[in-house]
Amino acid sequence: MSISEIKALIDSKAEDLNEQGDLAGYVASKIDLINSYIDQETELSESQIEDMLSGLVGFFTTSLHIPLDPGLKLLRARAYKTMHLESNVSQLSYIAEEYSDKASIGRLNEQGHPVYYGCIYFSGSGGVNVAFSESNSSVGDTVNVLRSELNDAINVYYIGIYDHVRRQSKPRFMPADMFGFFCEVNQYQEQKYTPSVFLAHTLCDAFLSDILRRKENGNLYKVTSKLLNIFTSDDTIDGIIYTSVKSEGDPVVALKTSTVDGKMVHKSCDCYRIDHDYGYALYNAVHTHTGNIHSDNSVMWTST
């Protein structure tokens, strides 16, 4: 979407929302209600949660997709309590459809609906600590890591990007010109919206960014697990990019399984043993095996 198209969209929203009164107060009340539900202080039905989230996203976010180019490197880790070398790539990627009933609720997936969670990395050793932390690896665990690459461009939404803009905190992986683009959009919104409408957008983005960074507690996942479906209802959107919960600032993604099948190629595997967890997503891990992936998606492991 070009900057002129985005401005036209904001102009159209401004004509409607600027006449609606205290929308900042309205958004704040919805956020308070959802937070109360997360803290298990209030009961809400599943449909009430979906309606509130859809309303907040639909009216009070300016969602612009970020293109991720072919060649982008992704990795995903799976931890085991005993020594394990997985022989089937599909077991390391995402839970297959025939076993989808075993997919437990997660940060961005509902019960029985698997998605691919991965970490973006830029060098051979990069991203491994993030993957360990995202997979909740513990001392003594064996961790199988699947390394993959995009073989086609994908589109993702960065939830909470305007919260980064507000704090002038550019995500480490994001090019300066792209961050500048979001800054320009945010500035135009501030010009066109009433103070209350602009504050409503700011509150909504800060809230969405916040709940994706929180550690699991109470009913948190019953809320956040609905966001992927809301943001990817358009077939042209492949997933969501957000900041790692345990490794602040590092980019992680949640992608549709169809995107993994059609736009990603799995390159190799590695096996590690976790010897020490220092906290803050910092580990001492021994690289024990390297895995070569064959055309039938089997993995042949070699000791290192």
Image (cartoon, helix red, strand yellow):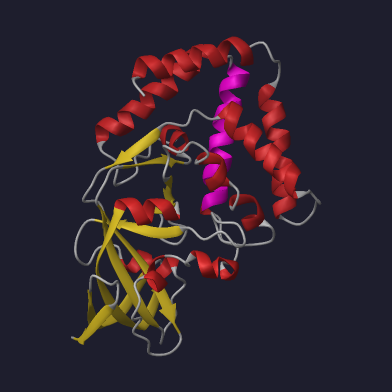
Can see residue 243? no
Residue 272 spot, x, y in % from top left? 30, 80
Judged left or right of residue 204, residue 150 is left
Q: In the rendered view, tell whether residue 222 sits above or below residue 237.
A: below
Look at the picture and state if 182 lies above or below 68: above
Q: For the C terminus, give its image quadrant.
A: bottom left
Stretch of the chain drawn in magenta = 195-212
Name the residue located 21 percent from the left edge and 51 percent from the top edge. Answer: 71
Residue 190 coordinates in the image, percent (x, y): 49, 18
Q: Height in image: 303 above or below 261?
A: below
Image mark count: 0
The quarter of the displayed image where residue 216 is located: bottom right
Q: Nearer the viewer, residue 74 or 214?
A: 74
Residue 211 within the segment the image draws in magenta? yes
- Front residue of 202/96: it is 96
Q: Is residue 39 visible?
A: yes
**Which residue is drawn at the image coordinates 41% and 37% (left, top)?**
236
**Relative to the observer, which residue lies in front, 73 or 220?**
73
Q: Position of residue 186 (x, y in %)?
A: 44, 24
Q: Position of residue 145 (x, y in %)?
A: 32, 72
Secondary structure character of the magenta stretch overall: helix
Could you say which is closer to the camera, residue 229 or residue 56? 229
Quadrant, the N terminus: top left
Q: Quadrant of residue 80?
A: bottom left
203 inside magenta stretch? yes
